[in-house]
Amino acid sequence: MDKKILIKNARAIVSCDGEDRVYRDADMLIEGPKILAIGRDLMNGGDPASGGDWKQEEVQIIQAEGKFVYPGLINTHHHFFQTFVRNLITIDYPNMMVMDWIDKIYRIFQNIDSDVIYYSTLTSFADLIKHGCTCAFDHQYCYTGKTGKSPVDRQMEAAERLGIRYHAGRGTNTLPRSEGSSIPDNMPETTDEFLKDCDRLIGLYHDSRPFSMRQIVMAPCQPINCRRDTFAETVAMARDKGVRMHTHLGEGENEGMIARWGKRTMD
């Protein structure tokens, strides 16, 4: 059984529970990942919701006078692998449209290896944790000849090392540059490759239980760089496996979308 922790005499505890309640000059009693009670003077039974059946010597007390307690922040979209390449001075990003940047940056992405994935993920996690994030989602679509199928595995390794809750978006690009995408021809996967690796990752890592620390999300990169069947098969498999989905709906590629599909991504 996890030892209980009592955060005591916080100036304010913000619930973010739908009612956005703020408890002032209050305590919070925690056991493992679960909040047992919030209220005043819990150590002395001042709140009947405190559980009652616990002894002072069984509790680690954290004095929180003058402190604010709030839920950890949630990061809903990121590309950790770009941490080491996003601001290269050789690519004039501030003066480029997104699709122009993507066209040039993918030629650098194709050189990324497994260690870049691992250390850029560690760097991103550390920065997020530093600023109060406790649950992160990353849209990982960089699969190269040097990474193989390892990126999400390396990210899970980094997440476990730092103890952050991680939802991994297993991305993909399935349309090669020779057929109109911005992806170098040595980077795309087939839809079958993508689905097979999603199945592997879901079996290894996905945990849908309450308080789980890791989940897998199926996340084709975007319509401009993936085949139609990639999205159709993703929907079918995600429903079958009970996992979530994610993608880019639009990144400034509307002209390309009109040429390929006859409509804009947001229509």
Image (spheres, grey):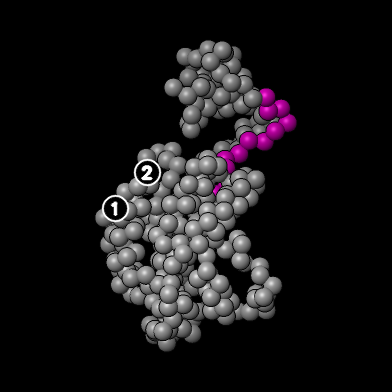
Residue drawn 60% across the image and 79% down it: 97
- The correct choice, above or below, for 218 with respect to 34 in the image is below
Provide residue 161's location: percent of width, then percent of height: 53, 42
Look at the image and tell me in which quarter the N terminus lies. Answer: top left
- Which amino acid, mark 1? Lys
Across and down, in percent, residue 250 comes to: 49, 73
Provide the residue designation for mark 1: 241
The residue positioned farthest toward the bottom in the image shown: 259
Could you tell me residue 88's position as x and y percent?
A: 66, 70
Residue underneath mark 2: 207
Q: Which residue appears at 53% of the width and 27% of the height?
A: 30
Residue bounds of the magenta highlight: 63-74
Along the line of sight, the residue nearer the viewer: 25 or 235 = 235
In the rendered image, which quarter contains the C terminus? Answer: bottom left
Q: Residue at x 31, y 55 (%)?
A: 199
Q: Which mark is residue 139?
A: none
Nearest the viewer among 230 and 10 is 230
Does residue 11 appear left or right of residue 136 in this picture?
Answer: right
The residue tagged with tag 1: helix, strand or loop? helix
Check if mark 2's residue and mark 1's residue have beta carbons within 8 Å. Answer: no
**Apparent side of residue 221 relative to residue 190 in the rendered image (left or right):** right
Q: How far apart are the two marked residues, 2 and 1, measured between alpha carbons?
A: 11 Å
The image shows a total of numbered marks equal to 2
Place of residue 241 in the rendered image (x, y in percent of width and height, measured from the top left): 29, 53
Residue 156 seen in this snapshot: yes
Give the quarter of the image for residue 172: bottom left
Please check the rendered image and state whether residue 68 is part of the magenta-colored stretch, yes or no: yes
Is 48 colored magenta in this rendering? no
Dot 2 or dot 1: first in sequence order is 2
Quarter assignment of residue 96: bottom right
Q: Amino acid at mark 2?
A: Asp
* Nearer-the-camera pick, 49 or 62: 62
